[in-house]
Image (spheres, rainbow, N blue to C red):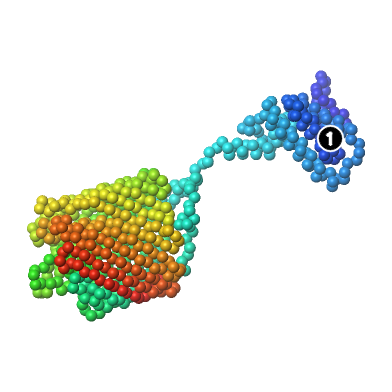
Amino acid sequence: MSVQKGFTKDRAVVFNPLRWIVPLAVVAALVPSQSASQTVLRSTIAAGVPLTDENLNGIEDAEEELTDEQSDPGPTETQAAPVFESTLQDVEDAEVEALAGSPQLRRDSNDLTRGDDTGDGTLTFDEREASQLENNARERPAQRVDVLESNGTLRPLANQPAQPLQGGNLQAIDDPYAPLGIRVGTFTLFPSLTQTLGYTSNADFSTNGRESAFSQTEARIQYQSDWSLHQLRGSVGGSYQSFFNGVSEDLPTFDADTELRLDRSNGFTTTFGGNLRVATESATSDNLTVPVGVSIIERPLVYSAGAFAEIARTGGRLNGSLRGALERNHYESAALSDGSSLSQDDRNNTLFLATARLSYESSPALQPFVEASLGTRVYDEEIDRNGNMRDSIIYGLRGGVEFNRGEKLSGEIAIGYRAETFDDPAIATLDGLTLDANVAWSPQRFTTVSAALSTRFDGSTNLDENGSLTYAGSLGISRQIKPNLTVDARALGSLQVFDSSGREDRTLQLDAGAEWRLNPNLALVGRLGYETVDSTEPGSTYDAFTARFGVRVQR
């Protein structure tokens, strides 16, 4: 079949597809080492001749001439197939290489269009696709990827630093000895009952206290909701300590806490909470003053109840919270040895306190903050037993840093100033530097070291005294030796300074304990402790050693 090239005045161009298929097939079959097109193309490139359409047509003519010159029969079909594919690939590679080096035929990858190779200098579809993807990956910056949390905040996933394996965000390992809890609706309850027998060298924790064996019973139930949004949690419990030889009064305690968190959008949460405490006051308390020759025969109960509401924003660079709280303190009358009682109604008071906190997330693990508080304490009786007016205004300011490196290291440290000014000008302002800290460090897995600092202000009912300031610090370590065996130890020291009288009490407490869990519902517990108080006030120095061992039943 004849092939007409070009245009004539009276005849259209005739295109014959065999012009491409037959010569290439013959070339592939008869010349397995190197095709004519490759030879001509490589010679053209080596000579530095520009690759134009005319030169490419010359390569095609060379293929046709080689086809006419070959007359020997080619290999069998099974032999020619792999050679044919290999040679075609070489031709394609050489043409692409030539096109890439030609300034006249170079194409910008952004201008390439989808289509088949037409032989006019346009790259094939696979080559254009690969070039386009390469340019996209090179020119487009990494995009930020965030996850929407339940509280409405966005948690970034892209470009986050890798967490260290040791102490990082590791997947929690199921504890085969952990209490299973009791499922009640959408809540899980964790009840426990602990019964111990013990010995103390000083049952009253006083200068003349006597030794005694004792029994102590503790019961507690914790609860937590399993809601997908919001949370309600808390605990209720108490204890009762009874001394066998009657050298001291029985000591009951009770406490309850609850907290409701409501998750809002954009990182806002609203939290409401309440608490109740019931305990006995020591007969040797500095606030219990009785006439000479009269003693307290029954420890009075002290009730403390509180509530708070807080709105907070977290998850952004600038975070903050606003908290309002109140606390009610009520003191029972003390029974005296002469049959009378000591009224403590003038000690009953209510504290109202507002606290604002502002923090800045300088990094995901570090947040400096500043906190200011303002409040007032109002007593039920305007004038106390000594004729003093003890209503007061309380204000404070502190700054610090909060840090969180996951399970490895977390906590906060703060320093500030707090003052309480009284309505009565005869009572000096109770003020001082505040030091507060709470740090948890895990040097290795199953080991936790904790440290804490706290500052406490206590009132007084003595004539013209403003109260005391107590600084306390503790250091503890806990180690899980086996999945069912945990031991811990702690040291605590405190300094209580009575501002008006100059009295100072120094306290040191040491204790260590162990818990051996036989199964998720039963554990053996034991604890040893030592406490010593050194006071500048005569009759207030003492020490005590305590040991107790028992069993805990839980669910």
Residue 161 is left or right of residue 315, and the answer is right
- Amino acid type at circle 1 is Pro
Give the SS element for disc 1: helix
Corner quadrant of residue 205: bottom left
Residue at the top extreme of this rendering: 9
- Category of crowding for the residue at label 1, using alpha-carbon neighbours closer than 10 angstroms: few (below 14), some (14–19), many (at least 20): many
Tell me the residue at 69%/31% (across/down): 100
Tell me the residue at 29%/71% (across/down): 239
Tell me the residue at 28%/69% (across/down): 530
Quick one: 238 or 213, which is closer to the camera?
213
Quick one: 124 or 8, which is closer to the camera?
124
Residue at the bottom extreme of this rendering: 245
Q: How many marks?
A: 1
Quick one: 189 or 138, which is closer to the camera?
138
Residue at the right extreme of this rendering: 72
Give how far across and how far down residue 476 sits, in percent. Answer: 35, 62
**From where the camera sits, is residue 410 visible?**
yes
Tell me the residue at 27%/74% (across/down): 200
Corner quadrant of residue 408: bottom left
From the image, tell me which residue sits under label 1: 23
Query: Which quadrant is home to the C terminus?
Result: bottom left
Give how far across and how far down residue 220 sits, in percent. Answer: 33, 69
Give how far across and how far down residue 69 sits, in percent. Answer: 89, 33
In the rendered image of this protein, does residue 123 appear above or below residue 480? above
Query: Which quadrant is home to the N terminus?
Result: top right
Residue 210 is left or right of residue 51, and the answer is left
**From where the camera sits, is residue 331 visible?**
no
Give how far across and how far down residue 547 sits, in percent. Answer: 31, 74
In the rendered image of this protein, does residue 61 appear above or below residue 514? above
In the rendered image of this protein, does residue 12 appear above or below residue 491? above
